[in-house]
Amino acid sequence: MAKIQLQVNGSSITVEAEATLLSVLREQLELTGTKYGCGEGQCGACTVLIDGRARRSCQTPASAAVNKKITTIEGLAQGEHLHPLQEAFLAEGAMQCAYCTSGMIMSAASLLSSNANPSEAEIVRHMDGNICRCGTHPRIVAAIRRAANAAKESGR
Amino acid sequence: MSERYEFEMPLEPERYELTAPPAYHFELDRRDWFKFLGAGLLVVCVMKNVKAAQETGGAKKPAGEALPEEIGAWLHLGEDGIVTVYTGKVEMGQNIRTSLSQAVAEELHVAMGKIRMVMGDTQLTPFDRGTFGSLTTPTMNRQLRKVAAAARNLLVELAATQWKVERKDLVAADGRVSDAAGKRSVEYAALVKGQQLTQAVPADETLAPAAQWKVAGQPLPKVDGRDFVTGKHKYPSDQKLPEMLYGKIVRPSAFNATLVSVDTSEAEKMPGVTVVHDGNFIGVAAASSVLAARAAALIKAEWKAEPQPGQKEVFEYLKKNVTNAGEPVGLATHHDAGSVEPAMAAADHRLAQTYTVQYIAHTPLEPRAALAEWNGDHLTVWTGTQRPFGVRSELAAAFHMPEDHVRVLMPDTGSGYGGKHTGETAIEAARLARAAKKPVKVTWTREEEFTWAYFRPAGVIEVASGMLKDGTITAWEFHNYNSGASGFETPYDVANQRIAFHATKAPLRQGSYRGLAATANHFARETHMDELAHVVKMEPLEFRMKNLKDERLRAVYQAAAKKFGWGRAKSAAGQGFGVAGGYEKGGYVATCVEVAVDRGTGEVKIARVVTVFECGAIVNPDGLRNQIEGANIMALGGALFEAVEFENGRILNGLMSLYRVPRFRDIPPIESVMLERKDLPSMGAGETPLMGVAPAIGNAIFDATGVRLRGLPLIPNGLKIS
Ligand code: FES
Ligand code: FES
C-alpha cells in the first residue's frame, strides 16, 4: 500500500494513502476530534484547515493533502492556551451535544483568518455549510463575533 | 452459523417510551460496595412506590441486608473528597451532566469541580428506563438532591459527634463542616476517612426551596466544556480498543426484504476480513473502514421484497388501516367529556378540517455507532443510546444470554432527539465481534441513519368543532390517526369533548421523536383555533383567551404577546403575525411569529420568533435558554420543509444533500423568555418549547396571505398563492 507523508498539527507523519483525509485522521492518527457527519461535504463536521483554509476532510483524498499544512481541532490551541474561538465557544455556551463544535470552530477559524471582523451576515454566509442539529446557531454566531472582538482587543 | 439472530424490533409510537421492565440485579453486598468504591460515605436513594422506582430506578433484591430494595441513584463521597454520583440517565447535549451536578453541589455544599457523574453504565449505575420524555429534571434531579442533602446531614452529624456539640451549632459549606463560631472546621474528606458509612434516603425528604438555591438556579457552563472545544471528548463513534476492527453491514434492497441468495466468496478471499452471514444479517469486519466497505461491496446479495405503500398515499393508507390494536401502555387513548352530538347540533358555527404531518427523520449529527468486545461469554458495548438498559436487554435477547453478562456504556453522545432508543448498531457490532474474535466498531453512514433508524410517525388529524356566535367553543372532536396521543387533549375550556388516538398499520418503522405527537396535535389544534377565530372574526389571541381558564397557559400567552408587541398594525405588505401555545409534560409554552411573504415568488421569510416558556423553578437558566432556542430551531425544520420521501420500501431522500434541515441562513431572530415559578417543581424542557412554532408560522402565513396550510411541512417547495 502506498505511503505518504502528511504534515498534521506541526508533525510530519507517514500514513497509508488509500483513504479520505477524514478516515486517515480518525483511524490511522486517532485524531477523532474531526467528526463524520455525512461524508457528502454537506454538514461541515469534518472540517479541518489545509494551509489555513477550511476544507471538508471527507471530500479530500489524503494524497491531495501532501506537502500542505493540516490543522485539526486538536492542533488549534497553543499548549494550554486555547484559541480565541475555543475560548469564545466556551464563554457563549455555544454547544449542546457539541458534535458539530470542532467543525464549527475550524470553519470559523478560516473565516477569521481572512476576515478579522466579519459582520453577522458574513458569518451566516460563511457558516451555512456547517450543520448544527441541536439548534445552537445563534450562540455560534455570537461566539464568532466574540472571538473577533477579543482578537481585535488583544491586537492580534 | 447456527445462532439465531433476532434483529427486527418493532417500534410503535408512544408505547415505546412506556414499557418499563425494571431488570436490575444488584449483587454487591455492603462490603463489596466499599471494596469497589473505597472507604467513605455512601448514600442511596430508595424509591417508595413501585411506579416511581420504575421511572428512574429499581434495583432488585440486593444481597446485602443494609441495602434498600429499590434504588434510584446513589452517591459516594471518598476519602479524597471526590463525590461520585451514579445515575442511569445519559448526556446527549441536553446538559444534564451539568444540571445534575448542580443539584448535588447545591445540597451537599461542595464545589462543582469535586463532583464526578457516572452516567448510563449498566454495570455501575442503577437501572433506568431511559433518558426521554423530559423526565430527568422532575425525577432524577430531585432524587440526587435528596441523596446529596442526606449526605450533608450525615457529615454534620459526624462532626457533631466528634466534637461533642449540637448539630444545630454546625454549618456545612464549601466541602467542610464548621462550627458557627468559626473556631473549628473540618473537610468532608477528613470526616469520612477510614469510614464505611451507608445511608438510605427515602424519596420524600424535604429539600431546599428553589428560592434559597445558590448553585442550582445559576447559569453554569457545561461541565468538561474544554474537552468539547479541543476535540478531546470521545463520542461513541470515537471509541477505540487495541486490535479493533471496523464493521460494515450489507443492507437489504428494501424494507422488509428477505434474502434470496448471497455469494460472499470474493469478500472471504480478502486477507484479514471476517464475513458473517446469519439469517438476514450479512456483515463484514476488517482492519479499516475502507477495507470493510470494499469487502462489503464484493458481496453479491439478492433480496426479495413485497410492494409497499409510499409517501404519495400515506395519509390514505393510515386512514384505511386502523387497527386500534394494543393501545399504548399507560397513556390514555381517549378523552371524553359531556356529550358532543347535541352540543354540535346546537352550535351556531360548525367547522370540520383535516390536518396532516409527514414522516420526518431525527438526523442526529452523530449517526448511530457501537463498539463491541467479547470477553469469554461476557459482552461489553459502548454505544450512543438513550436507553442503555434497554439496549442491554436487546443484546441479551439477540444472543440468548443473561443480562448480567452484558454491559452497556454510553459515552456522552452526539444527540438523540428521541431517535436513539434502540440497539441495532450494538447488536451488529457484537455479532461481528463474536465472529472476528476481536473488538468491532460499527458506525452507520448518514444514508444508513436516514434509512435504517426509525422515523417520527406521519399522522392524519381530524378536528370538528362547534361554537356559539360569541366565540365560545361548545363542542370539540379530535381524532389522531397514527401519529400519537401525546398532547392530544385540549387545554381550552370546552364542555363537550371527544378526543381519540387511533393506532394504524404504519408504512415505515416509527418511534419516538422529541416531543412525540404533541407537535402534530398542537399543530392541528392551534391551527383549528385560528380558523375558528377567523369564523367569528375575532382576534386570534383574544379568541384563545376567551376559551381559556388555565392560569399558567394564560400567563405565557400574555407574556409572549407583550414581548412580541402583539396587536400592532402591519407595517409592510406580506407581513403576517401568528400565535400558538399549549402545555405538555409540565411545561407551558406560547410562541408568536412574524413572517414576511413575497407574494410574487412565494418565498416565506420567518422574520421573528418569540417563545415564552414556563416549567416551574429553573435549575440552570443558561441550559434552559439553550434548550428553548434549540427546540425552536429544530421545530423550524419540521414546520417548514422536512419530510421523508419514500416509495415501495425505499427512502428516496436519505442523504444530507437531499433531506433539508435548518441551516444558519434559515434561523430567524429568536427571543426566548423564561417565566420562572420558584413555587412550582422543576420540570423538563427539552421538548415542549417546540410545540408552538409550526402552528404559529402557519397562522402567520394565513395572516399575511389568506392561505390556510393544514399539513406539515408547511412549505417544502415555497408557498403557492393563487
Ligand atoms: S462529514 Fe464531511 S461534510 Fe459532513
Ligand atoms: S451542538 Fe449538537 S449538533 Fe451542534
Image (cartoon, rainbow, N blue to C red):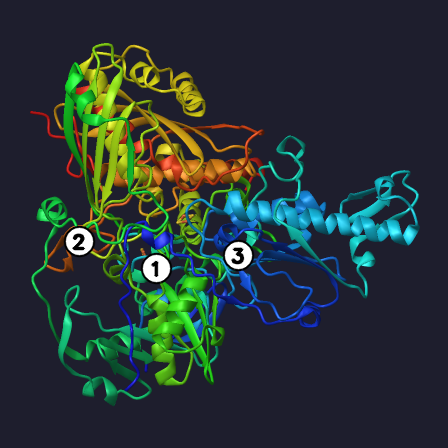
C-alpha span from label 3 to label 1: 28 Å
Q: Which residue is mark 1?
A: B367
The residue under label 3 is which amino acid type?
Answer: Gly
* Relative horizontal placement of residue B55, taking residue B416 as reference (left or right): right
Q: Position of residue B164 (x, y in %)?
A: 93, 49
* Residue at 20% over, 13% down: B536
CB contact under 8 Å: marks 2 and 3: no
| Numbered-mark total | 3
Label 2 crowd (10 A; few <14 / some 14-19 / many >=20): some
Which amino acid type corresponds to the residue marked 2 in the rendered image?
Answer: Lys
Q: Earlier in the sequence, mark 3 or mark 1?
A: 3
Q: Earlier in the sequence, mark 1 or mark 2?
A: 1
| Distance from the alpha carbon under mark 2 to that under mark 3 | 33 Å
Q: Quadrant of the N terminus of chain B?
A: bottom left
**Parent chain of label 2:** B
- Residue visible at 41% across and 46% down? B133
The residue tagged 3 is B57
Return the residue at label 2: B505
